[in-house]
Amino acid sequence: MKVVILCGGYGTRIRDVSDNIPKPMINVGQYPILWHIMKYYAHWGYNEFILCLGFKGHVIKNFFLNYEANTNDFTVTLGTNKSIVYHNEHGEANWKITLAETGHHSMTGARLKRVKKYLAGEEDFMLTYGDGVGDIDINKLIAFHRSHGKIMTVTGVRPPGRFGELMIDDTAMATEFNEKPQTTGGLISGGFFVCRKEIFDYIDDGDDVVLEQKPIRTLVSKGQMMVHCHEGFWQPMDTSRDYQLLNDLCTASTAPWMVWDR
């Protein structure tokens, strides 16, 4: 099953971290968050990706065109007998990546519609955003999707809290402080979708089609969207604070999504 990743947005809320690269290319630890997302899917055995490019898509293209140099030590021999020898091994040797230009100003629905041709022959495909990570059980997600036969499955998650959570005892003494807890409120969409090919019947042509508006609302009204509830870790990278949190988890080797390092 192929994995479509939406990588074309402007990332206006995180411009204070970097405004010269697309948000999926902002590093978490040593590598871009996009790489972390792809590594996570590959851990579950899904290593064929379609990247929907837009804002500064050339940065993403250059990263993968020069992947060996970007991820390995290497020795360069100059002159007539020039050569490059890479010294490291990596676990991405079998990845297949299609980098698709889907429009500089296109919205999410338009981006998805424009990669339909790369999904020819696929009954189902996975879809996610290029700026969020989690420890979703991908096999359970797919099994749930196939069990109900609806057009779309979305992963429902608890929204991460924006403020520190204090737990106190009867005397008002603090007993616990969580810097960025997950709220106990309702579920929100965490991305990590699985879609049947019929999703394209609900997406009109045009740059301004937002997947999360008319297409998904129509699916909901027709009873064609199911929710796979995920109570574990999920975190988007929308702001500089989110960026710092993800990097702190990575630095401390406690990142829940980095299952390939265990």
Image (spheres, grey):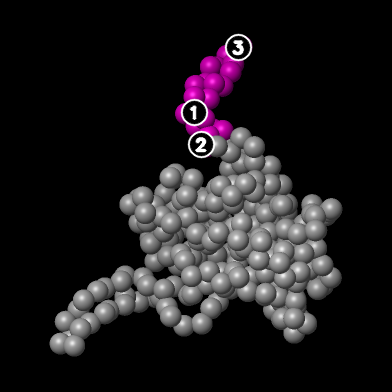
- Range drawn in magenta: 68-90
Q: Amino acid at mark 2?
A: Thr
Answer with the quarter of the image where residue 126 lies: bottom right
Which residue lies under the disc numbered 1?
88
Labelled pair 1, 2 in contact (Cβ < 8 Å): yes
Is residue 45 among the parts visible in the rendering? yes
> Total of numbered circles in the picture?
3
Res. 81 mark: 3
1 or 2: mark nearer the eye: 1
Which comes sooner in the sequence, label 3 or label 2?
2
Which comes sooner in the sequence, label 1 or label 2?
2
Q: Is residue 174 above or below residue 84?
A: below
Please identify the quadrant where the C terminus is shown: top left
Distance from disc 1 to disc 3, alpha carbons, whole Å, reads 22 Å
Q: Amino acid at mark 1?
A: Asn
Which comes sooner in the sequence, label 1 or label 3?
3
